[in-house]
C-alpha cells in the first residue's frame, strides 16, 4: 500500500472514531433526561391499615385513590415533551419548519470530502459536528396568532480536517471549534407563509485560524417560505459583515460572507419524510473562483417516540456542483439527531393570551 493510501485510510479511521465518540456522548446526554422523567411516575403505595379494613370500607377507600391515579395519568402525559405538538408525524413536520414552536436539540454529524487545485492526490477526508439548540421564544399572543423570537445558536466542532498549506499537496490535520453564530429573528403569524427577519451575530470563537474569521461580525438574516399539510419549503439566508479588529491579521480585509440554507420536505406515511437542506456559501473577499460553494442533496427523515419524547433522525448526502477552485468541500454525508425538549419559556413574554 502506498504512503498516500495509508494516509487516507488513517484519516478515515481517525474521523470515524471521533464521529462515533461524539454521537455516543450526544445520545447518552439526550436519553438520560427521558429515562429520569419516565421513572418519576411511580405507583401509589398501599397502606397496611387500609389493607386490613373490612372489604366494603377498603373498596370505598380505594375509589378516591383510583380516581387520583386516573387524574395523574393525563398530567404525566402532558408533561412529556412534544405531546402538545401532536403525533410523531406532526412533530416531524414542525421540525422541518424553522418558524415552528417546537423546542429541540439539533445535532449533526458529518463526514466531508474536500479537493481542489492545491491537492492533486486523492480527496482529503474530515469530520464535523454541529450543535444547534432550537429555541422559539413566545413574545406575544398564542396559538396561530403568536409572535415568536426564533433563536438557533450554532456551535461547530471539527475533527481531523485537512488544512492546506501554501505548498500544493501539503496539508496539516487540525481539530477544534469554529466560530459560534447566533441568529435572532422575529417571526410574525402569517398563516401558511414562513416569515422572519432580524440580526445575526458571529462570535470569533475558533480555536484554529483556518476554522474562523478572527473577527466579530454581524448582519441581517431572514426566513421566507411556504407550508401546506403535505410539504414545506423556503430559504434562510444569513449575511455577515466583519466589525472591529482582526488582531494579528490586520492586513486581511474585513469579513463579508453569506450562508444560505434552502430547504424542502415532503411528508410521507408513518412519520417519514424526504427532502433537502443544503447550505450555499459565498465569500465576497475571496479570490475569483473561490467565492462560491453550491451543494445539492437528498435527505430521508423519520420521527419516532423514544423514552416518552419525539426524536427525529435524518440521513442525507450532498454534492457541490460549484466549489472553490483552490480547495473546498466536494461531498458530504450527514446524520442529524433531533430530540424534542420541553420549552424553557412557555408563556408569551408580553402577554396577549
Image (spheres, rainbow, N blue to C red):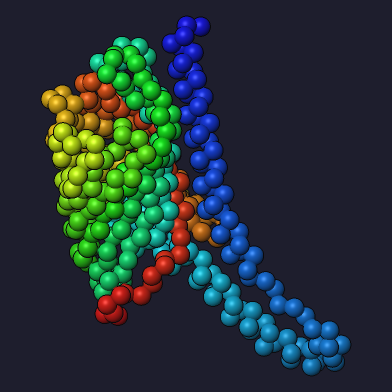
What residue is rendered at 50% in x and 34% in y?
A: 18
* Relative image position of residue 186 (x, y in whole percent): 22, 63
What residue is rendered at 41% in x and 56% in y?
A: 104
Count the numbered circles shown: 0
* Relative image position of residue 7 (x, y in whole percent): 46, 16
The front one of 177 and 150 is 177
Q: Say whether residue 348 is left or right of residue 3.
A: left
* Relative image position of residue 259 (x, y in whole percent): 23, 42
Q: Say whether residue 311 is left or right of residue 93.
A: right
Q: Say whether residue 72 is left or right of residue 180.
A: right
The front one of 233 and 99 is 99
**Viewer can see residue 264:** no
With respect to residue 330, does 31 lie above or below? below
Which of the 4 quarters of the picture holds residue 114? top left
What residue is rendered at 45% in x and 64% in y?
A: 342
Q: Residue placed farthest to the front in the image?
A: 248
* Relative image position of residue 141 (x, y in whole percent): 27, 75
With respect to residue 312, does 147 lie above or below? below
With respect to residue 189, does 21 lie above or below? above
**Viewer can see residue 112:** yes
The front one of 209 and 117 is 209
Which of the 4 quarters of the picture holds residue 102? bottom left
Specify the quadrant that holds the C terminus: bottom left
What residue is rendered at 28% in x and 15% in y?
A: 167
With respect to residue 45, does 20 lie above or below? above
The front one of 289 and 177 is 177
Amino acid at each position: 500500500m502506498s504512503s498516500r493510501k495509508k494516509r487516507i485510510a488513517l484519516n478515515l479511521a481517525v474521523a470515524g472514531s471521533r464521529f462515533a465518540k461524539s454521537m455516543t456522548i450526544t445520545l447518552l446526554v439526550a436519553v438520560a433526561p427521558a429515562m429520569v422523567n419516565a421513572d418519576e411516575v411511580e405507583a401509589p403505595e398501599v397502606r397496611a391499615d387500609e389493607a386490613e379494613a373490612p372489604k366494603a370500607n377498603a373498596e370505598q377507600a380505594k375509589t378516591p385513590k383510583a380516581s387520583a391515579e386516573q387524574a395523574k395519568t393525563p398530567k404525566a402525559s402532558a408533561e412529556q415533551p412534544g405531546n402538545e405538538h401532536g403525533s410523531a408525524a406532526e412533530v416531524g413536520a414542525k421540525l422541518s419548519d424553522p418558524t415552528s414552536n417546537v423546542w429541540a436539540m439539533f445535532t449533526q454529524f458529518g463526514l466531508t470530502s474536500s479537493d481542489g487545485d492545491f491537492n492533486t492526490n486523492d480527496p482529503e477526508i474530515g469530520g464535523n459536528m454541529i450543535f444547534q439548540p432550537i429555541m422559539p421564544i413566545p413574545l406575544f399572543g398564542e396559538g396561530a396568532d403568536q409572535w415568536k423570537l426564533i433563536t438557533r445558536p450554532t456551535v461547530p466542532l471539527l475533527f481531523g480536517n485537512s488544512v492546506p498549506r501554501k505548498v500544493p499537496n501539503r496539508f496539516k490535520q487540525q481539530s477544534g471549534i469554529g466560530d459560534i453564530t447566533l441568529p435572532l429573528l422575529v417571526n410574525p403569524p402569517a398563516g401558511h407563509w414562513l416569515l422572519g427577519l432580524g440580526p445575526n451575530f458571529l462570535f470569533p470563537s475558533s480555536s484554529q485560524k483556518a476554522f474562523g474569521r478572527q473577527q466579530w461580525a454581524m448582519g441581517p438574516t431572514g426566513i421566507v417560505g411556504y407550508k401546506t399539510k403535505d410539504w414545506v419549503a423556503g430559504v434562510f439566508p444569513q449575511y455577515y459583515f466583519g466589525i472591529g479588529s482582526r488582531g494579528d491579521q490586520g492586513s486581511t480585509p474585513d469579513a463579508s460572507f453569506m450562508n444560505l440554507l434552502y430547504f424542502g420536505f415532503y411528508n410521507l406515511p408513518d412519520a417519514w419524510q424526504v427532502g433537502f437542506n443544503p447550505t450555499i456559501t459565498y465569500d465576497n473577499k475571496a479570490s475569483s473562483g473561490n467565492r462560491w460553494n453550491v451543494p445539492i442533496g437528498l435527505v430521508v427523515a423519520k420521527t419516532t417516540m423514544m423514552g416518552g419524547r419525539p426524536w427525529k433522525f435524518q440521513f442525507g448526502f450532498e454534492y457541490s456542483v460549484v466549489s472553490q477552485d483552490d480547495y473546498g468541500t466536494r461531498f458530504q454525508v450527514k446524520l442529524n439527531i433531533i430530540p424534542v425538549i420541553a420549552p424553557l419559556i412557555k408563556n408569551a413574554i408580553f402577554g396577549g393570551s
